[in-house]
Image (spheres, grey):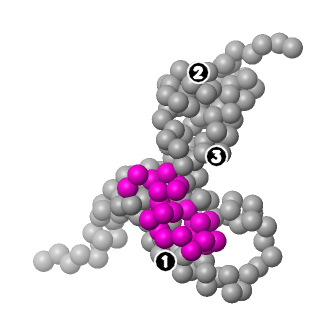
């Protein structure tokens, strides 16, 4: 069995002269860290801890994780926590505060704000909506439902907030000028 370098230069000619593909060994290491986050998304997962699980440096881990999975580690963890919170809201009668703390949030305010930024709704609204939808269930496997409802965090929460605050071209066109 041969050994692979952590990175090897790609055969593809891309826009960047530094176009790389990840080795199978690195992907296995990244998947190990991703699996740990999935199994214990309620725990704190700083990049240093994830890099230690993957046996690579922190900077290398952060770059490689984003390249492999399309999201930085922190955003991936946020999606997993919000997915779990939505499931608990749908399937249990736990108070929202308990759900927030059990899914790894230290502050109810941060949970609520982040939840609203990602899903577009408050946790209570999601619970009401999901419960109403239960009265007319469709035969969809839970894994498919979870994947379909997975929040997409291609931009950071703070970027989303800034975009909402910025004026658009349409708002300038609709303003009356004297």
Q: How many numbered discs, if any?
A: 3
Residue ID at (29%, 76%): 174
Give, as a single range, the part of the protein colored magenta.
85-107
Residue 82 falls in image quadrant: bottom right
Tell whether 42 sits left or right of 32: left
Residue position marked by numbered label 3 in the rendering: 38
Q: Main secondary structure of the magenta part?
A: helix
Say which label, 3 or 2, has the lower sequence index: 3
Which type of secondary structure does the marked residue at label 2 adopt? loop
Give neighbour class at mark 2: few <14, some 14-19, many 20+ (Cα, 10 Å).
some
Residue 114 falls in image quadrant: bottom left
Q: Say which of 38 and 14 sits in front.
A: 38
Tell me how far mark 3 sits from mark 1, CA to CA.
Answer: 26 Å
Residue 12 pos. (x, y %): 70, 27
Q: Does residue 41 appear in the picture of this structure?
A: yes
Seen as rendered, the residue at the extreme top is 2
Q: What is the number of the mark on residue 125?
A: 1
* Residue 2 on the magenta span: no
Contact check, label 1 and label 2, Cβ < 8 Å: no
Which type of secondary structure does the marked residue at label 1 adopt? helix
Residue ID at (61%, 21%): 55
Q: Does residue 120 appear in the picture of this structure?
A: no
Task: Assign the N terminus to one quadrant of the image.
Answer: top right
Q: What is the number of the mark on residue 140?
A: none
Contact check, label 3 and label 2, Cβ < 8 Å: no
Which type of secondary structure does the marked residue at label 3 adopt? helix
Residue ID at (50%, 32%): 47
Tell me how far mark 1 sits from mark 2, CA to CA.
Answer: 42 Å
* Residue 104 on the magenta span: yes
Say which label, 3 or 1, has the lower sequence index: 3
Seen as rendered, the residue at the extreme right is 1
Residue position marked by numbered label 2 in the rendering: 56
């Amino acid at each position: 069995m041969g050994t692979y370098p952590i990175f090897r230069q790609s055969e593809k000619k891309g826009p960047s002269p530094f176009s790389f593909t990840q080795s199978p060994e690195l992907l296995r290491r990244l998947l190990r860290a991703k699996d740990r986050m999935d199994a214990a998304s309620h725990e704190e997962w700083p990049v240093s801890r994830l890099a230690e699980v993957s046996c690579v440096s922190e900077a290398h881990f952060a770059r490689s994780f984003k390249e492999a999975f399309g999201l930085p580690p922190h955003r991936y963890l946020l999606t997993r926590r919000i997915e779990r919170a939505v499931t608990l809201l749908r399937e249990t009668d736990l108070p929202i505060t308990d759900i927030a703390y059990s899914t790894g949030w230290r502050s109810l305010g941060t949970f609520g704000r982040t939840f609203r930024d990602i899903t577009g709704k408050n946790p209570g609204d999601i619970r009401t909506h999901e419960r109403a939808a239960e009265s007319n269930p469709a035969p969809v496997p839970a894994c498919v439902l979870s994947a379909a409802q997975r929040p997409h965090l291609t931009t950071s929460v703070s970027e989303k907030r800034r975009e909402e605050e910025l004026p658009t071209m349409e708002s300038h066109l609709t303003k009356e000028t004297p």
